[in-house]
Image (cartoon, rainbow, N blue to C red):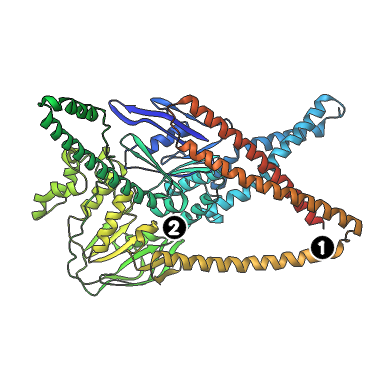
Amino acid sequence: MVTVHNLSVVYGERALFDGISFFMSEKDRIGLVGKNGAGKSTLMKIIAGIASPTKGNITIPKGRKVGYLPQQMKHNEGATVIEEAQSAFAELNTFQERLDAINIELAERTDYESNAYMNLIHELTELNDRITLMDGDSSQERAERVLKGLGFEQEELTRPMSTFSGGWKMRVELSKILLGAPDIMLLDEPTNHLDIESIEWLEGFLIDYPGAVMLISHDRDFLDNITRRTVEISNGRIYDYKFNYSNYLIHRTDELERQKAAAANQQKYIEDTKVLINKFRAKKNKAAFAQGLIKKLDKLEVIEVDDFDKTKINIKFPPAPHSGKVVVKAEDLAKSYGSKKVFSGVDLILPKGMKIALVGKNGVGKTTLLKILTGQEGYEGDFELGHKVSMGYFAQDEAEKLDESKTVFETIDDEAVGEIRTQIRNILGSFLFGGDDIDKKVSVLSGGERTRLAICKLLLQPHNLVIMDEPTNHLDLASKEVLKTALKQYDGTLILVSHDRNFLHTLAKDIYELKSTGLKHFVGDIYEFLSEKRATSIAQFEQEKLKKQDQTKAKSKAEQEDNTSLNHQEKKDLEKQKKRLLSQIQKLEEDIAKHDEVLKQLQEGLSALDYSDESKAQLALEEYKEHERAQESRYADWEDKTQSLEGLEARS
């Protein structure tokens, strides 16, 4: 469906991409990966049509709709949440406005036999059909369902966009993409600012989504649960794997080991051959043999080892100073802003050395609670820190609070005290700030670089209580793993807020869920907590569903008593029609399954195609499109016949 052909992007003397090509089929689930600055967002913007390559092209079939969620976006501040979300139905709204105008005009006209009147009737019919096809009658209900899935409460839907934070505005933008139902969905870090429940909802939505999805994410579980293919951008080239992220890492590592072994064997062969050449080239009777070896070496294609970036930060927390047995003690803690209650009834006793995860929906007050613990917010109730507690705090906006006028070196040098000042260059090097990087101004650093620098600041002094609020924002997947390992090895007490399930997994053995009514303690891993929470939610959902079913059955029974049954001949005719339709549907399903396999093989062929041969590539694409159109026709026929069968069954 999307063909990327010989794409290059050059900035000055630096080539971001150099002649990359790949194919994206209509139901692909692609994870786009690579280190910061590799060009992931740039490639996504080019596919979305909002950036241009230096050379090469992107081909998308006519009529296919692309939805793109960027990292930075603009919003209509004056609209309400529901109004902004429903702007995704712009085409539907245009149809509805025209429909209303026609109805008004028809009510006023009396020239019933004229061509103009009949044309209006035809247009009215066509518009009604289009609105029905787009499920226009339920547009508001769909918008509300998606917004609630992304964490909005019913009463928040009528609030202006200007009253929400950037994270919540991003959710509205995401809802517009989802509601627009594009054929190709491009999502750049869609889980930023989402809580765990919303991330899981979005996963379920994308897994069942009928179109193609390409996403950039630093959330490993999110990538693994959704994607079935990983495209890595590295050093201007792409590496395409038919696996999710975790399996891609395994195969990529194995591939590199094979390359290294093959390159080493080849180098040994070259060296041995050179020895033979030097040995025999001066001998008359062996000169021809030596020349033959030289020609072989000249024709030898040297095996290159892919430059797979494995540079990692090196984080190690200083040993925790001694503290009392109880580090944090809170009783009946509450927080309000005027008449608005954030939470109440928070009780917490945190023993020395405990590592806990603080979770809960966005807006419930997790960051507010952390600010109370760090002395930045007032509160009601009782709270105290334990004996000799030394606290280190990483705020959610810690990276943004760095002084942009300072250099990387000055940022650390101004904070370092005592003997550690002599090790600043080594410390910065372990956080991947080497050479001239230490003289860069903070203002030019990327989000990931700023986060690394902020974590580096935190480690300059030893603490026995570390509180971290979303520390993995902007960190790449490899850096997250290093930070996780460092926190596991840290011997102090840890309070951690994170929406990254894989990051919390095995790190925190106690989960505290914050609600408006207090803290709920769960002993176990984050996956066990989520499993239990889902089970509880499902049980509640099933109870409500059963109630609705009972009400529907009672209503249906009353209606059935008023209906007369079909006579015998009508029943016989209905059964004949049903059998005929069932036979046709079964035949279509067999054809669809058979041609799905054909399409799958063609897709695999397109993925492996050498796009440098344009005529061959064009023929392959045309063959695929022909089969795709035929399959779409089969699906449409199957849907029509299935609906007809359902109609007959409803009558019998």
For label 1, the SS is helix
In the depicted structure, whether residue 426 falls above or below residue 369: above
Dot 2 alpha-carbon crowd within 10 angstroms: few under 14, some 14 to 19, many 20 or more: some
| Residue 236 in view here | yes
Q: Label for residue 649?
A: none
Q: CA distance from mark 1 to mark 2?
A: 44 Å
Earlier in the chain: of badge 1 and badge 2, it is 2
Dot 1 alpha-carbon crowd within 10 angstroms: few under 14, some 14 to 19, many 20 or more: few
Q: Horizontal placement of 146 versus 398: left or right?
A: right
Q: Tell me how many marks there are.
A: 2
Q: Position of residue 331 (x, y in %)?
A: 36, 73
Q: Toward the viewer: 205 or 21?
A: 21
Hey, what amino acid is under mark 2?
Answer: Ile
| Residue 105 in view here | no
Q: Residue 120: which quarter of the image?
A: top right
Q: Position of residue 191 (x, y in %)?
A: 43, 50
Determine the residue positioned at 38% across, 67% down: 525
Hey, what amino acid is under mark 1?
Answer: Glu
Q: Horizontal placement of 144 versus 512: left or right?
A: right
Q: Position of residue 143 (x, y in %)?
A: 58, 48
Q: Toward the viewer: 430 or 572?
A: 572
Determine whether label 1 and label 2 are within 8 Å by CB.
no
Q: Toward the viewer: 623 or 276?
A: 276
Determine the residue positioned at 36% across, 29% down: 9
The residue identified by callout 1 is: 559
The residue identified by callout 2 is: 196
